Image: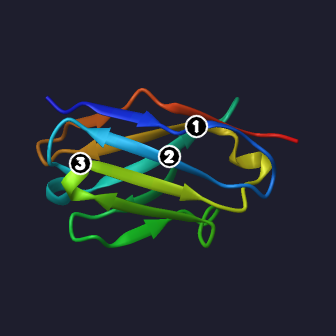
Amino acid sequence: QVQLVESGGGLVQPGGSLRLSCAASGNIFNIYGMGWYRQGPGKQREWVGTITRGGRTNYGDSVKGRFTISRDNAKNTAYLQMNSLKYEDTAVYYCSVPIPDGRVYWGQGTQVTVSS
């Protein structure tokens, strides 16, 4: 059983920055990779970006150039650094780990609100 816990959300002004963390219950990010997703008010869940087990990152067009995914294997933690935040980045952010057998583990989410 994989447990994921996000943290670091909060209220930030447009143009500001936040760093989200996703702590895993075990050493899994360098085995399976992980992804960040978000769901804004009244919107469907949206893919934000992914870091593969080899460390390669990919991002959605809406966050490319502003968001960066990284991880610390020693701490079993992945991060989402968010810069130049916009109103439309307001959402609940989730981390996710897909397992080869088809299961997908999700964290509980952390709220990010961009507001002046």
Horizontal side of residue 83 vs 93, given as left or right: right
5 shown above or below 12: above
Q: Which residue is mark 3?
A: 76
Marks 2 and 1, how far apart at CA: 6 Å
Instruction: Check if mark 3's residue and mark 1's residue have beta carbons within 8 Å.
Output: no
107 shown above or below 85: above
Q: State which tag comes first along the sequence, 3 or 1.
A: 1
- Mark drawn on residue 20: 2
| Colouring of the image | rainbow
Q: Residues within 10 Å of mark 3 (few under 14, many from 20)?
A: some
Horizontal side of residue 42 vs 111, given as left or right: right
Q: Can residue 44 be seen here? A: no
Marks 2 and 3, how far apart at CA: 14 Å
**Residue 74 falls in which quadrant of the image?**
bottom left
- Mark drawn on residue 9: 1
Marks 3 and 1, how far apart at CA: 19 Å
Question: What's the residue type where badge 3 is placed?
Answer: Asn
